[in-house]
Amino acid sequence: MISSRSSLKEIRSVGLVGGGVMGSQIAHLLALNGIHVVIKDVSNIILNQTILHIDKQLDEQILFNKRRVKREIDRIEGSHGFRLTDLQKATLRKKLRTASVKINKKETLSHITPTLDYDDFQDCDIVIEAVIEDLDLKKRIFKELDNACLSGVILASNTSTISISKLASCTRRPEMVIGMHFFNPPLALPLIEIIPGVHTASNTVESVLDFSRGLRNYRRMMEPMIVKDLPGFVVNRLLLSMLREAFELYHYGAASFEDIDKALKMGSGMPMGPFELADLIGLDVLYDINRSMKLSARGKTMRGADRVLKHMSSMGLHGRKTGKGFYVYNQK
Ligand SMILES: NC(=O)c1ccc[n+]([C@@H]2O[C@H](COP(=O)([O-])OP(=O)(O)OC[C@H]3O[C@@H](n4cnc5c(N)ncnc54)[C@H](O)[C@@H]3O)[C@@H](O)[C@H]2O)c1
């Protein structure tokens, strides 16, 4: 796959379909990088929630940056048992200030335009789809995007499991369709799985790689990685097998979900247990992801895991976003 730099498409404006957990964070990340984002969802109520969510996350990050110096001073003094001098504190303050991403909340928010209409994607160089993990819905959206967007616009999907080639086949531009799989939360996790479909052109891949490499989240530069168009790609394939096994253990009463989380954190150094991770992802989203993986594996998945996910999802226990999943969360 060789393409000259001059054939690369410069991406300055992005359309996003879906302003939920992932869409809102991707919009936040892009706006932080000065990229203009047009975000489409199905109602003004949802779009208002999306903008409010980004607004709140920006406030939290500003506060986090402000408290960072004090936290770091406390950490150094606490672990080494001595007090830093004023000069050392000033040096540390300067170092941390340079290392933190500068946030201009008003400017960041000004890069985001909410919409209910595909017409507002006219000036976008790429559109990233981030609606729920449902093959029929995603196919419909790719058809609509193909009709609504100019022929030079790249169409990407943030799908966790669905074949990019299948989505590309719903359009008249399969060479410009690609997977761009961000991880939750993209504001902290740098990986983006870049998934070419069978017909994706090399300059589409290169343009998206080039664009992704230029982005940074609150911690570091993003790290795009090309992966094959297989169900679940790389990370979700690995993570899901662990999550399903955890649901099986829970279903058959091997231990409480709290203890399974504790076991993995204490016994294998994982930063988060499988049930905490499931609540973060969203149990409704996981239910769809599991179903989609099951379809591509011709039904061969674990029954206990299927039952737990189905039960939690049908009860509206979707995890952090509904305030209750396996754990209960304080909704401020
Ligand atoms: N949640 C995660 O941890 C995670 C991580 C990586 C990738 N993903 C993938 O990202 C995608 C979105 O997941 P999510 O967690 O953000 O889901 P979500 O349920 O939080 O958000 C989906 C959004 O899509 C909107 N939507 C539905 N139909 C629409 C339409 N026709 N037009 C415009 N908007 C529409 C919904 O109103 C909702 O706001 C899925 O494909 C999922 O597999 C999720």
Image (cartoon, rainbow, N blue to C red):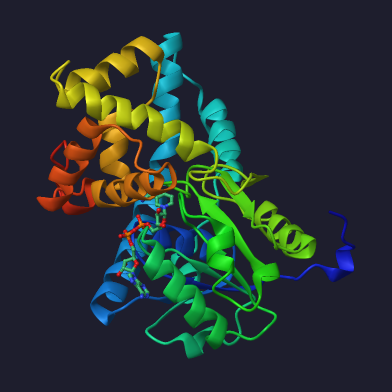
Q: Residue furthest left?
A: 315
Give the total of numbered labels.
0
Can residue 67 be spotted in the picture?
Answer: yes
Residue 256's place in the image compared with 189, above or below, is: above
**Left or right placement of residue 138 versus residue 180 in this view:** left
* Quadrant in the rendering for residue 275: top left
Quarter of image, res 52: bottom left
Left or right, 163 with reference to 123: left
Compared to residue 165, the image places residue 181 above or below, namely above
Q: Where is residue 24 in the image (x, y as percent from the top left)?
A: 39, 63
Judge whether residue 332 can be spotted in this image.
no
Q: Residue 162's x, y, as percent?
A: 47, 54
Q: Which residue is drawn at 45% across and 35% down?
A: 69
| Residue sitting at x 40%, y 13% | 268
Towards the viewer: 188 or 156:
156
Which picture quadrant has residue 273? top left
Q: In which quarter of the image is the N terminus?
A: bottom right
Query: Closer to the camera, 260 or 87?
Result: 260
Q: Which residue lies furthest to the bottom in this view?
A: 119
Residue drawn where x is 31% and y is 25% of the image: 245
Foreground of the two, 314 or 274: 314
Left or right? Give the position of 311 relative to 183: left
